[in-house]
Amino acid sequence: MPNQRETASYEGQLDKFAQALATARKMQQDWLTYGLDFVHIYIEDVDGDWLETWGHDEILGNPLLDAIKEFLVSDDVLAVQVRQQLGKKSLFDFAVNLAECERIIEQSDRLSAIKNLLADDDGDNVEVGNLANQLVEKFF
């Protein structure tokens, strides 16, 4: 036999489910009543650029990414070597991917990821390894 806590928990879950179901039914009725214009009821600034900028908040305002971008366009010897290694690859894409390497916890995995970002088919593996090590020391 369930105790009072379990019963209260089930009742709470049932209440949440009933509210969600009622909200979904209202939304469906609004869709039937107003057609596609129903989105104006539920989404503020539906005509704005929110879809185009979805996810940019993670990129914009990231201090590590800003530091990497500033570094890559600087006259720093390492930055010049990285630009030469990248050739015609996008510096912005490299900066974003390098900043994402911060999420990699294991140091050896992070180093491998940075080597992959720097590598090209004709590249010298020793030089790529040295550049990757220096970037790890500089930013991580």
Image (spheres, helix red, strand yellow):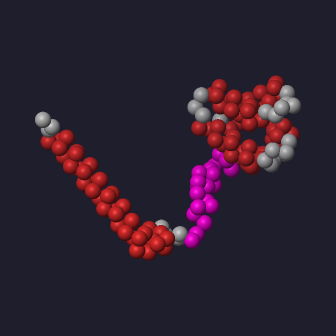
Q: Quadrant of the N terminus?
A: top left
Which residue appears at 60% of the width and 66% of the height? Answer: 49
Which residue appears at 19% of the width and 46% of the height? Answer: 8
Which residue appears at 85% of the width and 27% of the height? Answer: 124
Relative to 14, is 36 on the left or the right? Answer: right
Which residue appears at 17% of the width and 44% of the height? Answer: 7
Quadrant position of residue 76: top right
Decide whether residue 48 is among the magenta residues: yes
Camera-side residue of 23 and 125: 23
- Give percent across and percent down for residue 44: 49, 69
- Give percent across and percent down for residue 27: 39, 66
Instruction: Spot the residue most to the left.
Output: 1
Camera-side residue of 86 and 13: 13
Relative to 45, is 64 on the left or the right? Answer: right
The stretch of residues the image draws in magenta is 47-66
- Give percent across and percent down for residue 28: 39, 65
Decide whether residue 136 is among the magenta residues: no
Camera-side residue of 107 and 138: 107
Q: Is residue 62 visible?
A: yes
Secondary structure of the magenta portion, mostly?
loop
Relative to 96, is 24 on the left or the right? Answer: left
